[in-house]
Amino acid sequence: MQNITKKLTFSALVTLILFSLVLIPQASAQPAPVEQTIVNGQVKDGANNPVSGASVQTNCNGNVRNTSTNGDGKYQTVYTGTECPVNTVVTAQATAGSQSGGGSGQVQEVINTGTVIINVALINIAVPEFGLMTGAVAAVGSLAVFLKMRKKTV
């Protein structure tokens, strides 16, 4: 009985040591928290010209910031390191009139500050006729299939 207890104690000790060896490196692989994360970029139109006054919305872990571009089409938003830690993906959406665009990037650590650059190209998305035409074609196609199937069953 005493021999079994020694074996169980030894097994438990070996398991604990192996478990510690697996967990400790993973815990130390986590990046150190940064003080703040800066998200910046430039908004350009389809002709590659900077867009001044575009509305920009950035999102990091559900934390949303709104800003607008300066005369050079550049924008910047700032998060705390807790709101937007290193290795997190940030999205940016920009709109100017009927044009919009978006992008995303991963936060990288640069001297105790998280940084991500997301440049956004705006495209004209105001094409309501295209959606209407696509819907009409889908409806006509569905009706044709329905009538053909109905004819086969009669």
Image (cartoon, rainbow, N blue to C red):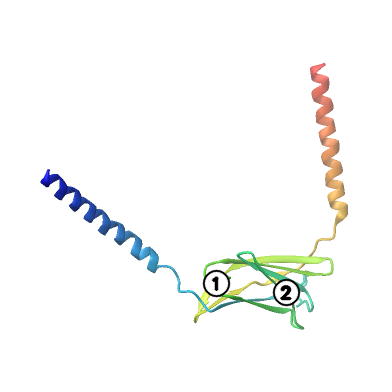
Q: How many marks?
A: 2
Quadrant placement of the C terminus:
top right
Query: Would you call the spot at circle 2 few (<14 residues within 10 Å), some (14-19), or many (20 or more)?
Result: many
The residue at 35%/65% (across/down) is 25
Q: Amino acid at mark 1?
A: Thr
How much space separates mark 2 and mark 1, taking CA atoms? 27 Å
User: Which residue is disc 1 drawn over?
Assistant: 82
Query: Would you call the spot at circle 1 few (<14 residues within 10 Å), some (14-19), or many (20 or more)?
Result: few
Quadrant placement of the N terminus:
top left
For residue 22, above or below residue 41: above
The residue at 84%/69% (across/down) is 97
Where's residue 45, x and y in %?
A: 77, 72
The residue at 78%/69% (across/down) is 95
Front position in the image: 3 or 96: 3
Where's residue 73, x and y in %?
A: 74, 79
Q: Specify whether 115 is left or right of 7.
A: right
Disc 1 element: loop
Q: Earlier in the sequence, mark 2 or mark 1?
A: 2
The residue at 85%/52% (across/down) is 130
User: Which residue is disc 2 drawn over?
Assistant: 43
For residue 78, above or below residue 26: below
Q: Amino acid at mark 2?
A: Val
Disc 2 element: strand
Residue 120 quadrant: bottom right
Front position in the image: 122 or 84: 84
Where's residue 52, x and y in %?
A: 78, 79
Mark 2 in CB contact with mark 1 (< 8 angstroms): no
